[in-house]
Amino acid sequence: MDKYRVFGNPIKQSKSPVIHRAFAQALNQDIEYDKYAPEVDSFAQAVQAFIAEGGKGANVTAPFKEEAMRLCDELSEVAAKSGAVNTLSFKGGKIYGDNTDGFGLVQDLLTQGVSLSQANILMLGAGGAAKGVVASLLAEKPLSLTIANRTKAKATLLAEQADSDIVSGCGFDELTGSYDLIINATSSSLSGKIPEIPTNIINEDVCCYDMSYSKAPTPFLTWARQQGATKVIDGLGMLVGQAAKSFSIWRNHMPQVAPVLTMLRKELQ
Ligand code: ATR
């Protein structure tokens, strides 16, 4: 049976095994998928050990996505652009790296009826999560992409790296524009906080998306609703979407996202 694994630390919370087993079941495929938390300094050895055991592929989550990129013999264009890898494939003694986070985000937004083409998009955060999705957002041809971060220098650097005239970077206190979509790519929800952005950029016409998810609405989405936003979306669909793309890279079959998303949503309640 083909073996897959997700690496991260911590990993207890990971839903990847449940998601991938559900995809395999729906497509009548036999796979093993488990989770493992290497010590922070032994990720590379853990991957090599998994390859030696016959592993076919792996997902990678925090804090190993950048290190995963350095392990790869070949990178997809998206992975190379995003500077991080969340999907490893082991074939013929080589390690191939891809990044499916941007695909998961874009697919979820489009499925939820949020149009990206010609949109003015604001992304909050300039860490690994933000970096991983810039290329996929730009591929949808928005009118503008503003990257705002608590530490301004990281936002301007990420904007420069995007190498596109529609991308700009700034600090939270400089935000004055009007946006169609605000994506929270900061890790603030994990600590129960919200990015300190001006309240007047949120109104009922702005879609607010949080890459985080939780049983209760995330702090950012709760706050966005309080400011008048009516369309708020959490990152559960992105999670299932990125997993579906990983599965298709490994197994050449694209699983359906919707049934697995419904199952996870029920489990969260
Ligand atoms: P990840 O891989 O989740 O992106 P990261 O690379 O450590 O993690 O980046 C975390 C991001 O969340 C950064 O943009 C960080 O802002 P700083 O660069 O200023 O540190 C942002 N972040 C974390 N907590 C935040 C908070 N409470 N308010 C605003 N931004 C926050």
Image: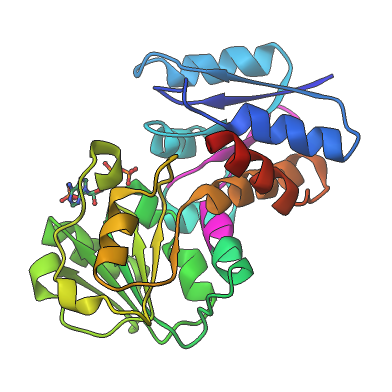
| Quarter of image, res 9 | top left
Q: Is residue 90 magenta?
A: yes
Quarter-of-image position of residue 167: bottom left
Residue that appears at 27% across and 85% down: 178
User: So how many labels did they put on this image?
Assistant: 0
Give whichever of 112, 115 is nearer the camera: 112
Relative image position of residue 164 (x, y in whole percent)? 36, 78
Residue at screen point 59% across, 34% down: 267
Evaluate whether residue 100 shows in this view.
no
* Residue 4 seen by the camera: yes
Q: Give the position of the N terminus as an image quadrant.
A: top right
The residue positioned 50% from the left and 82% from the top of the image is 141
Q: Magenta residues?
A: 84-105
Residue 135, image x, y percentages? 47, 65
- Of 87 and 35, the residue lying toward us: 35
Front residue (pair 7, 222): 222
Residue 222 drawn at (x, y percent)? 31, 56
Q: In this view of the protein, which residue sits in the foreground, 83 or 245?
A: 245
Q: How is the image coloured?
A: rainbow
Q: Residue at x 46, y 17 (%)?
A: 37
Q: Residue furthest right?
A: 28
Q: Is residue 115 left or right of residue 145?
A: right
Q: 55 left or right of 69?
A: right
Which residue occupies the extreme left position in the image? 173
Q: Is residue 251 magenta?
A: no
Q: Position of residue 149 (x, y in %)?
A: 19, 60
Q: In the image, is residue 180 above or below residue 110?
A: below
